[in-house]
Amino acid sequence: MPPEPALEVRDLRKSFGRIEAVAGVSFRVAAGEIVGFLGPNGAGKTTTLRILAGIFPPTSGEVRVAGHDVMREPLACRRAVGYFPEYAPFYPDLSVRAYLDFVARLKRIPRRARADVIGRALAACALETVAHRRVGTLSKGYRQRVGLAQALLGDPPILILDEPTIGLDPGQVVEMRELLGGLRGARTVFFSSHVIAEVAALCERVIVVAHGRLVAEGSPAELRERLHRRRRAVLRVDGPPAEVAAALGAVPGVLAVEPTAGGFVLEGEDHAELARAAGDVVRRHGWTVLELRPEAVGLEEIFLGLVGDGERGS
Ligand code: ATP
């Protein structure tokens, strides 16, 4: 039997009145995985994470956390999860240590274990030097680390983090990424973002949602490959540019020919077919193919492409 997934969601739906925020989403996250949950604003990420964290129930569908059903065993689910909400309810006048002590009490961590548990969370998030500072006086980067520290209290096996890098400057993003990367292997981490580069740097797998529906799932490399197959190829040809462009434009399956410095970028539905047809035409004219390769695609473009698919409902 394969091990129980850390998170399992089947046909999850959540409506707020007439708004269907999550419209039938299914996925699994294996124990120990770091998985990014990607989507534009309003895609349903926060709603899904809140259901996983036990904040509110789904309208329908099955959700299991560490093998427990969120509806039937809500306490067992909540104990397994450290949740970092998008807007963490900080108390600006409390010191970092006092705030963590407050959260530890809410989590019912016994008094005698508390100092030790808080010490470990402070260390894991490199917060020891600011433990005495009031939360309200800290930079956004440090406040986000406090948010992560409170999620870590009590050593939950699963962390659910809602946009942990939102509002951070590039240096702080790198620090947060390193902290999250340091959790690799020890815990399951499921975190949302709408900045693809951050997700790609950390995750072996990405789940993409748009309009409450899952539009893609795979490693960042797989998503890149998926787009390559039907997108753009770079072609350099030893031949008269205007004639080459005209010949390429007439190739079935080529949707656009874009001249670039030293060559062309071809656009088509299927990358493999595009490359084969273009290569044949060039050789038939007696010209030489100097270079033919898929165009490197940024994850940002992949994301736009995938979300576009979702919008068209395919
Ligand atoms: P963002 O990155 O902007 O937080 P998101 O992907 O997290 O986006 P959600 O916050 O889950 O998206 O919202 C999905 C949809 O559900 C949106 O249309 C939102 O307005 C709506 N929604 C979310 N929470 C509620 C609520 N409590 N009452 C009514 N509508 C809600």
Image (cartoon, rainbow, N blue to C red):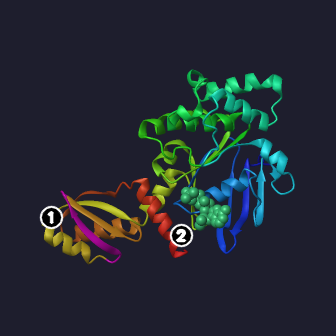
Q: Where is the C terminus found, in terms of image quarters?
A: bottom right
For disc 1, the marked residue is 239
Does label 1 or label 2 sit earlier along the sequence?
A: 1
Amino acid tagged 2: Gly
Image disc number at residue 55: none
Element carrying mark 1:
loop
Q: Residue furthest right?
A: 72
162 left or right of 116 in image: left
Q: Are marks 1 and 2 in contact (CB under 8 Å)?
A: no
150 left or right of 297 in image: right
User: Residue at 24% of width from left, 67% of height from top?
Assistant: 258
Position in image of residue 98 (x %, y %): 68, 28
Separation of disc 1 and disc 2 at Cα? 41 Å
Read off the magenta span. Answer: 252-262
Q: Nearer the viewer, residue 241 or 109?
A: 109
Determine which quarter of the picture holds residue 31: top right
Amino acid tagged 1: Gly
Element carrying mark 2:
helix
